[in-house]
Image (tube, rainbow, N blue to C red):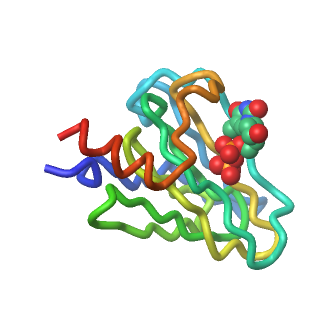
Amino acid sequence: MSLLDQVKVFEFPKISDPRGNLSFVEGARHIPFSIKRVYYIYDVPGGETRGGHAHKTCSSVLIALSGSLDVRLTDGENEVTITLNRANKGVLTPPGLWRTMHNFTTGTVVLALASHLYEEEDYIRDYDEFLEYVKTLK
Ligand code: TYD
């Protein structure tokens, strides 16, 4: 059983309307944790990569509100890549996985719903340290 099995892709409701579409995310109904923080990533220059870290406790759900990107998650052995390319699609990224975000199209805006407040101590930013850390999870 890998932490990768806990990665979950969500499709949020979409209310289609000739005036424009509307989607919504409800705390207890759609998100498997209580949302403590919201942050967003935007104005990403072409070819840039974001992420490049793991969290020890924080889970998040990522949604590309506009544009598209690839979210790559690895447990150090296997990896999955989820393409976020619709505003009503999200991915749950559990703690203990190394996450990078690639292939942003121009104008992409990524919304992140997080289970914890920002704490730098929760991050593992060195990949070798991450590989040592995942051994302690087994
Ligand atoms: P980081 O999480 O490394 O960004 P990404 O995963 O998108 O590449 O955060 C980048 C910087 O922003 C880092 O200095 C920490 C800071 N930051 C906050 O202060 N609060 C937050 O909620 C987040 C997500 C980051």
**Can residue 85 be spotted in the picture?**
yes
The answer to whether residue 50 is above or below residue 134 is: below
Q: Is residue 104 left or right of residue 100?
A: right
Q: Nearer the viewer, residue 63 or 114?
A: 114
- The location of residue 59, given as percent across then percent down, is 46, 35
In the picture shown, does residue 121 fall above or below 21? above
| Quadrant of the image occupied by residue 78 | bottom left
Please tell me which residue is depicted at 24% across the width and 44% down the height of the picture.
Answer: 135
Residue 132 position in % (x across, y down):
34, 46
Return the residue nearer the eye: 136 or 32: 136
Q: Dividing the image into four equal quarters, which quarter contains ligand 1? A: top right
Figure quadrant of residue 37: top right
In the rendered image, residue 50, in percent from the top left (x then y), is placed at 67, 59
Q: Nearer the viewer, residue 33 or 103?
A: 103
The mark total stands at 0
Residue shown at 60%/63% (left/top)? 101
| Point 44% across, 54% down: residue | 128
Image coords of residue 80 (percent x, y) = 36, 67
Residue 22 visible in rendering: no
Locate the C terminus by quadrant: top left
